[in-house]
Image (cartoon, rainbow, N blue to C red):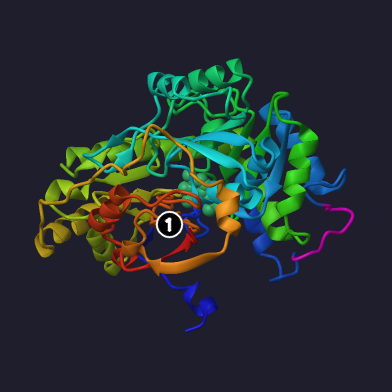
Amino acid sequence: MSISSFLTKKFLKSLFFPAHNRGEALPKGLIRLLKEQPGFWDLPELPEIGSTLSCSGLVHDAQISIAKRVNSKNCFFGVNGASGLIQSGIIAMANPGEYLLMPRNVHTSVIKACALQNIIPIFFDVEFSTETGHYLPITKKWFTSVLTNLDFEKKKIVGVILVSPYYQGYATNLEPLIKICHQHNLPVLVDEAHGSYFLFCENLNLPKSALRANADLVVHSLHKSLNGLTQTAVIWHNGDLIEENKLIKSINLLQTTSPNSLLLSSCEESIKEWLNKENLNNYKKRISEAKKIFKELIKRKIPLIKTNDPLKIVLNTSKVGIDGFTADRFFYKNGLIAELPEMKTLTFCLGFSNQKDFIFLFQKLWEKLLIHTNKSYSLKAIKPPFRLVQSPEVPIGVAWNSQTYSIPLTKSLGMISGDIICPYPPGIPLIVPGERIDKERIEWIKTQSLYNKDLLNSYIRVLHN
Ligand SMILES: Cc1ncc(COP(=O)(O)O)c(C=O)c1O
């Protein structure tokens, strides 16, 4: 079967990213465009259109007007996902050899940018719930204790990266943390890939958007948490701690010279749609409906975990002795496609279309799952074994570029990694280049990689002694 044939395959219900739900919730402007003659709109960078870094043209004008309406100093669209713009943000914040403070659960794109530029990550550990197998939001108390463990004299820390909300929807109260960083004169980049829509829906009892919490750079994934096409993203820039020219230079470094006109248009249309009062009211309705869906499922005794994002339905499969991967396979086979299976949970993304039929379908399949699946109550989520503050022993870029050789992961104990080991999902690196491979992490992989059974049997590139 060709890719194009598969793309038209129908599922009973698609609760994965992109959040436009297979076109149902695409912005109206984009739907209009897609109804035109196929491919007619696939234009190059004509002077009238320009690109994200042009000084004139429609893309430039859209970015200026949107930034103004959102009260941000400026913004830039991106066509290589939140990943691409996070990487540009990182390169704008730090020079090679400088240090960035970041939580251990950053997305793999952060590690790759650090490896590329030899920007040294100082990781801090994050509290973890063994009940759900999920990282917990970062409290002010936790963050303060991290800062007291840092040696600002010895290491040139030039910025901080924070992630909120997480994939499952847990959000950190960012404002106090950003305030502390600013007191140290440190700019903050917030990876808000999963929380774009918070910016447009104040007073719905949603987490405060990173932009409103005074972050210096905020990256939104417009296909995960707004209704844009896959690969679309935006970076917002505020304050004076990050030079605009440096940001522009960094975007230029990584961006394609042929940005897709459809994706650029999608960036504009998805954001503008949320800035329109009438449309916003419709989306707000969706969010209220999502809250009702959660309440109704709880009423029906389905074990859900509450997070700060109403659009994420997090099913605690471990409550009935089923792991998230088995449950995922079951739902998939029955036409209900989820987004994120993990050891103890399965996360569905409601997206922005009407999901009234979800409750009935979900309950029906849930009951079937309970009858037809073997149960095991020995599922045990263990916190990934990290120290409170930790940096790679060999600078990350040096390790990444060193001569390496490949050995079985189980035989790599005590070696320095030249690789990123990143169990997916959810794409959070467990070992990064330059780190010494310890017993604890190999043990962790042994017990925790339900989905990545092959991970333990895999090979890793390590440095020569
Ligand atoms: C927290 C977080 N940040 C960034 C990204 C990257 O987003 P994108 O797929 O838009 O590149 C992801 C993707 O899963 C993510 O979970």
Q: Quadrant of residue 240?
A: top right
387 vs 120, left or right, is left
- Nearest the eye: 281 or 331: 331
- Give me the residue at 53% from left, 43% from top: 193
The residue closer to the viewer here, 377 or 44, is 377
For the record, the magenta segment spans: 42-50
Image x and y of residue 157, in percent: 60, 29
- Say how many tags the image has: 1
Q: Is residue 348 left or right of residue 240?
A: left
Helix, strand or loop status at disc 1? loop
Q: Quadrant of residue 62?
A: top right
Give the residue type at disc 1. Answer: Ile
**In the rendered image, which residue does mark 1 sit on?**
421
For the point 79% across and 64% down, the residue is 43
Question: Is residue 269 something that shows in the picture?
Answer: no
Which SS type dominates the magenta stretch?
loop
Residue 451, above or below 212: below
- Where is residue 204? Give x, y as percent: 45, 27
Determine if the magenta segment contains residue 342. no
